[in-house]
Image: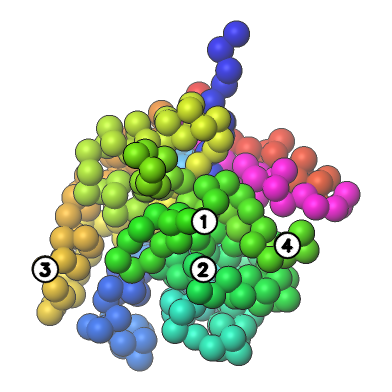
């Protein structure tokens, strides 16, 4: 009998085009309020696409966005999606002291829970900025009531990455610590190669992403975590002046192609939110296991 492929975790980092880490030198946080915001409309487009495909996902949402667009957060929750945290100010964790990090994630979690009316269990660090040098941040996540992080990308990259990290769920700080759910990678020629979407999904042909995720599901027999941003389906977004050639390439190339690629991805694979796909890794207690069983039963399957 042919085995059904694993259900993958579909995730979105809900931030606007001007909040991307590469834009920090050009748009200060003090300027955010004055920028033309497009995150609400773009996220609504994603929600409509997911609803049409009967797919549920996890939305790692900035507290700043939730505070300004509370109705959007409520639409995410009403659509059956998982609400999770992307921090409040989109600071890289490497730039914060422990106290500053605690303040940022506590504020974000409070805003998201107040607005969304649900418990926020997951966190993703901006720019995947948790790695071998600051795994202690996971202690702070545990102390502030988070159950999992999806902040480690086990690849070599010029701005992030922990290439020697496990490619499957792990607890860096022991059995009582937060579960880290790393982004999808494929192992080739002794290296981990990215298979989780983002800029690679836009810059490379769709067949590359599809083949990589199929390898994760087929050869590794495990689910993968895939991610995108709402601004990546928005070719009409305002251009930020003064950015470098490399940033322009990474941020703007193939924006017009991403939406159709995402539609193909929804058809080609099976998807669910992080808490459902990885319920077995998040159980830990009888109460947690029961909750995970319930979440797994609610996973959306796209055949």
Magenta residue span: 269-287
Cα–Cα span, label 1 and label 4: 15 Å
Numbered mark located on residue 137 in the image: none
The kind of secondary structure element at disc 4 is: loop
Q: Is residue 112 magenta?
A: no
Residue farthest to the front, as pictured? 190
The disc label shown at residue 245, or none: 3
- The secondary structure type at the circle numbered 2 is loop
Q: CA distance from mark 1 to mark 3?
A: 31 Å
Quadrant that contains the N terminus: top right
Q: Position of residue 164 (x, y in %)?
A: 48, 56
Q: Position of residue 168 (x, y in %)?
A: 57, 46
From this viewpoint, is residue 54 visible? Answer: no
Secondary structure category for the residue under label 3: helix
| Residue 131 or residue 108, whichever sits in front | 131
Alpha carbon of mark 2 to alpha carbon of mark 3: how far? 30 Å
Task: Return the residue at label 4.
Answer: 174
């Amino acid at each position: 009998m042919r085995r059904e492929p694993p259900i993958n975790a579909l995730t979105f980092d809900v931030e606007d085009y001007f909040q991307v880490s590469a834009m920090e030198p050009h748009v200060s946080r003090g300027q955010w309020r004055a920028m033309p915001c497009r995150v609400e409309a773009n996220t609504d487009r994603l929600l409509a696409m997911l609803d049409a495909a009967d797919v549920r996902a996890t939305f790692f949402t900035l507290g700043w966005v939730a505070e300004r667009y509370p109705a959007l957060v409520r639409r995410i929750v009403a659509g059956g999606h998982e609400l999770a945290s992307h921090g409040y100010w989109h600071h890289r964790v490497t730039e914060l002291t422990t106290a500053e990090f605690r303040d940022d994630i506590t504020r974000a979690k409070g805003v998201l829970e107040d607005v969304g009316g649900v418990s926020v269990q997951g966190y993703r660090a901006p720019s995947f900025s948790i790695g071998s040098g600051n795994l202690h941040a996971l202690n702070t996540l545990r102390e502030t009531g988070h159950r999992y992080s999806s902040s480690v990308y086990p690849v070599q990259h010029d701005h992030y990455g922990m290439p020697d990290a496990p490619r499957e769920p792990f607890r860096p700080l022991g059995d009582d610590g937060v579960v880290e759910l790393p982004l999808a990678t494929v192992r080739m020629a002794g290296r981990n190669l990215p298979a989780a979407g983002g800029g690679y999904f836009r810059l490379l042909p769709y067949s590359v992403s599809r083949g990589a995720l199929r390898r994760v599901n087929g050869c590794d027999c495990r689910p993968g975590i895939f991610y995108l941003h709402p601004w990546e389906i928005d070719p009409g977004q305002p251009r930020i002046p003064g950015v470098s050639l490399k940033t322009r390439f990474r941020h703007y190339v193939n924006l017009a192609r991403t939406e159709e690629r995402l539609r193909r991805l929804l058809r080609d694979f099976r998807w669910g939110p992080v808490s459902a796909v990885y319920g077995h890794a998040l159980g830990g207690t009888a109460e947690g296991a029961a909750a995970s069983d319930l979440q797994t039963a609610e996973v959306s399957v796209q055949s």
